Image (cartoon, coloured by chain):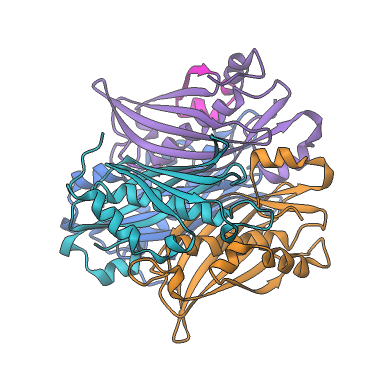
Chain colours: A orange, B cyan, C blue, D purple
Amino acid sequence: MLTPANPDFAQRVRDSFQLQNAMHLIQARLEQVTPGNVTIVLPHWTGVEQQHGFIHGGVVGMIADSAAGYAAMSLVSADASVLTVEYKLNLVAPADGDRLIARGKVVRPGKTLSITQAEVLAERNGQEILCALMQQTIMVMRGKSEKPDQAARTSKPLTTN
Amino acid sequence: MLTPANPDFAQRVRDSFQLQNAMHLIQARLEQVTPGNVTIVLPHWTGVEQQHGFIHGGVVGMIADSAAGYAAMSLVSADASVLTVEYKLNLVAPADGDRLIARGKVVRPGKTLSITQAEVLAERNGQEILCALMQQTIMVMRGKSEKPDQAARTSKPLTTN
Amino acid sequence: MLTPANPDFAQRVRDSFQLQNAMHLIQARLEQVTPGNVTIVLPHWTGVEQQHGFIHGGVVGMIADSAAGYAAMSLVSADASVLTVEYKLNLVAPADGDRLIARGKVVRPGKTLSITQAEVLAERNGQEILCALMQQTIMVMRGKSEKPDQAARTSKPLTTN
Amino acid sequence: MLTPANPDFAQRVRDSFQLQNAMHLIQARLEQVTPGNVTIVLPHWTGVEQQHGFIHGGVVGMIADSAAGYAAMSLVSADASVLTVEYKLNLVAPADGDRLIARGKVVRPGKTLSITQAEVLAERNGQEILCALMQQTIMVMRGKSEKPDQAARTSKPLTTN
């Protein structure tokens, strides 16, 4: 298991998630938070559907991106923040089922850049079907060495503590 | 300019967009639809924000994915449908501003696979700032030759006509 | 373990690899071939170096792409062929060491599209260090249903049997 | 046109390319170097072929990655270096023809991260056909602020000056 630099990593992740209106808008919930691993769950409801009654692929991407980004946040020190630099998502099956489960994990933590992956599964009648696979690059920004406006110019704050 | 195989391409794109609950949930609007080019606009409102008051990166991805997918749909015949196979998104600046403009375009149409790109711009005081860049692979499925359940096994229906 | 549709999958992969001049040019060797998994090894020699004496990132990409593409080929029927549609590669450490080991695997086989991943490790003094991670989309083309010239228009033949 | 921070950017790019054995191995040549744009050309010869006589997709990736990486290098100051963090490449047609032309360009320069794109064209009888499209993330490392061993831990040196 990976070692978190911040003993309060789980609370920090939960506090940040709580402040994200967009996660509430789609009714996503944060579930498991362990060092380097975060799970987000999304119930299937009409507001997140596309025209065939499946969950919209963009919403699948939202929870994959967030689960992996928070997995990265779970490992950094309390004065560091994480940004999504980029991600690549394969959609491999319709997001059909009672709910979606996005599991993000850090596959290579780094001082400046961390590489993460996420999978999104659709749960239906107790069975899980793979819907999406993601590979993501996260930037870690530390304390005062990185000025906020510089960060603003190079990437999107997923959080800045 | 690329040539659409369906003379009613614009109406078809608009009808499909109209049925996507998830687009309404985030208050996205379809604007320009020309052959191979689609623009989606998103007002900045509190429901789509992350914790710093910027628009959530996942929402940026949703409109980029949709704008490029619909750009691909604008070129295919009336009996064909399009699926997002995968996309790669770079987030290059915080999605700050009064509204976001996602411009999708087909850079290489194909019989089976089309390659698209999208850029997302944040408009603020009349200025546009680049927030995100995407490169995407779209699968085109034609009429009866592709069975629905086979399609379902390999990718997400963005639309199936 | 995944089930190969072709009992002679290993020989087929080896025959194809043998015909790739570019693999010989860089001195890559095919090692393990099991259903859904292929390993390619590259010795560190001066011809594949960049200016600092590490193995060139482009060469890292070559063996990652090939290992994963051949992993996909190991599962398809004898009359089907595979093409690389696209891949995304993160380079996470310099390719330093005595040799590189690229391990490709199929993470989601499909009738039309398969998703694969690869990791590239640098071996040095018996230790393996992760250098690169890749996620890839492979198209499977079956027998006469796909005309060669159509295939040629949409993607690169990694092999067409 | 983008403004280079180093007046000797073209010579610096040429010097770096000259030292890359792997570029010589595949017989790639550096052609145009302007601020934010670099062109690499590869003749079609047997050593870079795959089994059907097309140029190997991995070799296509090598010149795309390098053209875009050098495009980024053309803009940075003399004491800064650039690393490829990751790239995503779509292969859209077989690399057939007399020679390949890889055109890399910087689409968004940044202090820490730059986003680039490349296209690879196959030239045949004076016609150019699009073979590949790439989107890439480049890290810029400045002077002493980034220790070499830290850089080594997070990414591949394309150059470190």
Q: In x, y percent, where is residue C14?
A: 37, 54
Q: Could you say which is closer to the camera, residue C26 or residue B84?
A: B84
Q: In x, y percent, where is residue D25?
A: 49, 28
Please report the residue visible at 77 percent of the width from the left and 57 percent of the height from the top. Answer: A76
Q: Could you say which is closer to the camera, residue D119 or residue B38?
A: B38
Query: Is A12 placed above or below A129 here?
Result: above
The range drawn in magenta is D17-34
Query: Any magenta on residue A81?
Result: no
Q: Could you say which is closer to the camera, residue A71 or residue C47?
A: A71
**Residue A1 seen in the current view:** no
**The N terminus of chain C appears in which quarter of the rendering?**
bottom left
- B6 relative position to A46: left or right: left
Query: Is D24 placed above or below C146 here?
Result: above
Q: In x, y percent, where is residue C2?
A: 41, 71
Query: Is B87 placed above or below D10 here?
Result: below
- B111 relative position to D34: left or right: left
Query: Any magenta on residue D26?
Result: yes
